[in-house]
Amino acid sequence: MEAVILLDTLRRGGVEVVGAGLKAGPLTASRGVVITPDVPLDDLEGAKDFDVLILPGGLPGTEALREDPRVRDLLLAYFGDAGKWVAAICAAPTVLDGLGLLEGRPFTCYPALKDRCAGGGTWLDQAVVEDGNLITSQGPGTAFAFALRILARLAGEDAAREVADGMLVRA
């Protein structure tokens, strides 16, 4: 759910988005919904050249993200570049925590998983938390707010407001 809302919202805002999967072909989301990524991660040229790297939530998908060295390398590259954004929703902030990337930072995640993020960050009970180049969010019910915050950072507040209005999303 979070992945589809993100992809759709950002594309409505005119952002070029590439949905990458860890492997080729369709994947089954946590509730049995089948999604076909645009491209497998190995075929994605210039993966470090995007403005934002977004990790969707859901289990066991986030566990696969946590275990994948390509994802680790991308996250470290994006966090090391002040001009890049990293965004994670639901269970995905646990991936960031496993790399020590939440240390000393405010963040949010799915409330039942906040104890899995014990790496020194400060969990906030908010729909979306932004800190520097990091945007985190809590889960399915906050996916529109999360996507619109990312859109605002990439295309501006006016674009985000226009997309929200067009989708009948009320703040």
Image (tube, rainbow, N blue to C red):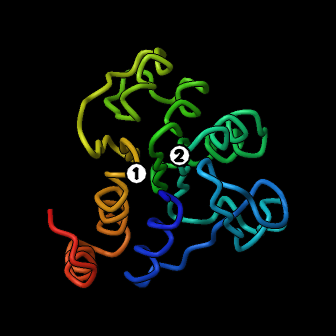
Residue on which disc 2 sits: 57
The correct choice, above or below, for 35 with respect to 133 in the image is: below
Residue nearest the observer in this picture, 154 or 164: 164
Q: Residue furthest front?
A: 32
Quick one: SS at disc 2?
loop
Residue 105 position in % (x across, y down): 35, 28
Q: Position of residue 68 (x, y in %)?
A: 77, 39
Mark nearest the camera among 2 and 1 is 1
SS category of the residue bearing label 1: helix
Pick whichever, 116 or 153, lies toward us: 116
Give x and y (percent) for residue 161.
20, 76
Q: Quadrant of residue 156?
A: bottom left
Q: Residue 144's quadrant in the figure? A: bottom left
Is 122 left or right of 94, judged from the image as shown? left
Kind of residue sitting beneath label 2: Gly
Residue at point 46%, 14% (across, down): 118
Q: Residue furthest left?
A: 171
Alpha carbon separation for disc pair 2 and 1? 9 Å
Q: Looking at the image, which residue is at 24% across and 31% down? A: 125
Compared with residue 138, is residue 159 higher up or lower down, i.e. above or below?
A: below
Above or below, comparing residue 41 to residue 111 in the picture: below
Q: Which residue is mark 1?
A: 140
Q: Position of residue 99 (x, y in %)?
A: 61, 27
Mark 1: amino acid:
Pro
Crowding at dot 1, Cα within 10 Å, few <14 / some 14-19 / many 20+, comes out as some
- Residue at image position (38%, 21%) is 121
